[in-house]
Amino acid sequence: MIMKKLISEVKGAKCRIGFPEAEDERILKAVNKALKNEMIIPVFIGKKDKIIEKINELNLKELKNVEIINIDEDKLQYACKLLNENKIQGIIAGAVYTSKKVLIDTIKLIGTEEGNNTISSFFLMYIPEWEGGENSHLILADCAVNINPSEDRLADIAISTAKSAKKLFNWDPRIAMLSFSTKGSASHEMIDKIRNATELAKGKVPDLKIDGEIQADSALKLETAKRKMTDVGEVAGKANILIFPDLNSANISHKLIEILSKGAEAYGPILQGTRKPISDLSRGATEEDIYGTITIVCKKILSEEKI
């Protein structure tokens, strides 16, 4: 599994990560587990007495000496302040805060990375009973940020996701720009947007392995792609990254995979295109989901940031 490899890569990294939802039991348990591998130095932000009370209640021995910043003001905004001042290297939030809150504060206080005007997100999905994608893994984007992205933004999302796949997981990205049409099987302005976004991405990164418009079955099943396409190329039937046309389809798809696929795991959403590492958890995230997200954010810090 990719996560096992990532855990071994970030073991002992001691990345300073801020947690502005440290009163949440899932956060505390995930951080306790991450401390055993010394992958992080957690900084808890919130009401100190309540955090300590919860740590004692759960008997989380690894957390006894964790740094706690006691504040009554907006915890997430304070975490962003610490990140901007390089006092922490990343933030993990969203188990309690809404995605809207996390994104607004990220855009307003952290901003975008140089050369990229589009903040987006991805989920890493593990589907154990499926043999496709990248060793039973898929990356889905954008599942949390852009509601109805323009052609330009779709192209940016594809490029950002390819970079994330390379940097974090050492993948050779094969990107499918999803639609309800495969290579002209239907006509609509929504399909035109996917085609145009695909060409824009190719223009910006000529060696990108990307194809669109393409239906999900053609992207993931080679025998289907061969029936529907005259030239399957490098992506059809072999895609490991799925770019969705809008937030409706992306959000619905990742939740259906997680619920209906036995043993499936979802890590994210991991924000990309931000000036500094920050992650927006799902409020339905489990302890294991959060631990996986901590691992990915640590790898992101190691690959992008030196403080």
Image (cartoon, rainbow, N blue to C red):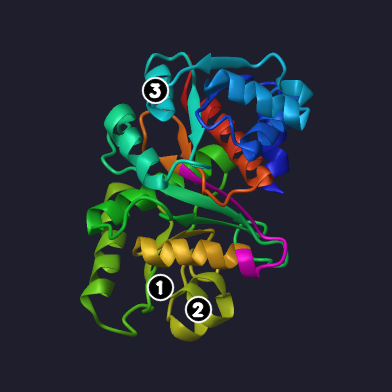
* 207 and 155: which is toward the camera: 155
Q: Is residue 228 above or below residue 126?
A: below
* 68 and 109: which is toward the camera: 68
Q: Separation of disc 3 and disc 2 at Cα?
A: 54 Å
Task: Tell whether 239 sits left or right of 56.
Answer: left
Q: Residues within 10 Å of mark 3 (few under 14, many from 20)?
A: few
Residue 280 in the image, given as x and y percentages of width and height:
47, 42
Q: Is residue 114 above or below residue 253?
A: above
Depth check, mark 3 against mark 2: the one in front is 3
Which stretch appears magenta? 259-270
Circle 1 sits in a helix, a strand or a loop, which is it? strand
Depth check, mark 3 against mark 1: the one in front is 3
Q: Which residue is mark 1?
A: 214
Q: Amino acid at mark 3?
A: Glu
Q: Residue at x 64, y 70 (%)?
A: 260
Q: Amino acid at mark 1?
A: Ile
Circle 2 sits in a helix, a strand or a loop, which is it? helix
Label pair 3/2, CB-CB below 8 angstroms: no
Between discs 3 and 1, the one toward the N terminus: 3
Q: Separation of disc 3 and disc 1 at Cα?
A: 47 Å
Residue 61 in the image, given as x and y percentages of width and height:
78, 22
Between discs 3 and 2, the one toward the N terminus: 3
Task: Tell whether 36 sits left or right of 216.
Answer: right
Which of the 4 image quarters holds residue 133? bottom right
Q: Is residue 262 magenta?
A: yes
